[in-house]
Amino acid sequence: MGNETIKLHSEEINFLAATSREFQGDERDVIYLTVTATHKFLEEGDRITIKPPTAVASEDFMRIYNVAASRAKEKSILYHSIHPDAIPIINPECYRKKIIDYYSNYRESNKLAKSNLLQDLLNRVDASSGDFEKGVCTFLYNNNYGNQINPQYKVGGYVIDFGIIMNNKKIAIECDGYTYHSGYEKIREDIKRQEILERAGWQFFRIQSTEWFYKNDQVCRKLLKWLNQYATETSSIS
């Protein structure tokens, strides 16, 4: 047990291996938490059954696990030695089981929250665009823009297919369907609208539906490169 500085890829990491009591009043960016316990496998003929670990339900153990699980600022990762089949049959008052269940349920609820976020975004895209805007929305979501994209984003009297505001940048992604955006008057309106919004600080990326469906890999690479260029740079919103 002790405090140690480790060099990893030219970066220094301050690493502390200790019991939870030694973390009291201290915080770390990442906590690796271990829960260990022994359990028996009983053989009865051809049948093997598991005897769960002894339950730990005292308030002392509660305080130990509470300190250990609440010291992480960015991420907490749990390792345990208990067989998956033994976890459901542990006394529900056992704090080992409670913390394992908490981490397991958090992971599953986080997956569900992400799934719900994607569905919410898809529900807000322009329904008349068919699979076009839904495909673009799913692509942006899968590439870590789910928390930033705003389908049908309103700016004054205009609507942008996907508006992104991050790092003080105003980003507009427009999906140009073949039918709706092919007429001369519509094209002229789009150009005028884009010029007005560009003067207000918006950066535009336009996607043609035919290119999205027939040159998808090329368009996706180009879009990600463009987003990495504009979304990661920091500037002031005018």
Image (spheres, rainbow, N blue to C red):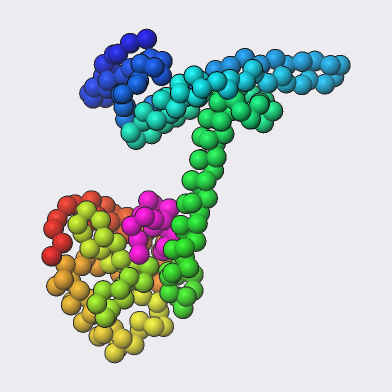
227 lies left or right of 53: left
Where does the magenta region start and end?
Answer: 136-150
Q: Reply above or below: 70 against 210.
A: above
Q: Residue 181 placed where, x, y %? A: 35, 81
Q: Which quarter of the picture shows residue 10?
A: top left
Question: Which is nearer the eye, 73 or 233?
Answer: 73
Q: Which residue lies furthest to the bottom in this view?
A: 185
Q: What residue is shown at x 84% (from left), y 16% (from top)?
A: 44
User: Where is the N terminus found, in terms of image quarters?
Assistant: top left
Number of residue marks? 0
Q: Residue 106 placed where, x, y %? A: 50, 40
Q: What residue is shown at x 82% (from left), y 21% (from top)?
A: 47
Q: Which quarter of the picture shows residue 150?
A: bottom left
Question: Which is nearer the eye, 174 or 154?
Answer: 154
User: Where is the C terminus found, in terms of image quarters?
Assistant: bottom left
Q: Residue 177 placed where, x, y %? A: 40, 77
Q: Residue furthest top?
A: 1
137 falls in the magenta region: yes
Question: Which is nearer the eye, 164 or 105?
Answer: 105
45 falls in the magenta region: no
The answer, for residue 217, to whether it is visible in the render is: no
The answer, for residue 182, to whether it is visible in the render is: yes
Q: Dominant secondary structure of the magenta stretch? A: helix
Q: Reply above or below: 126 against 138.
A: below
Q: What residue is shown at x 20% (from left), y 67% (from top)?
A: 202
Question: Which is nearer the eye, 72 or 145?
Answer: 72
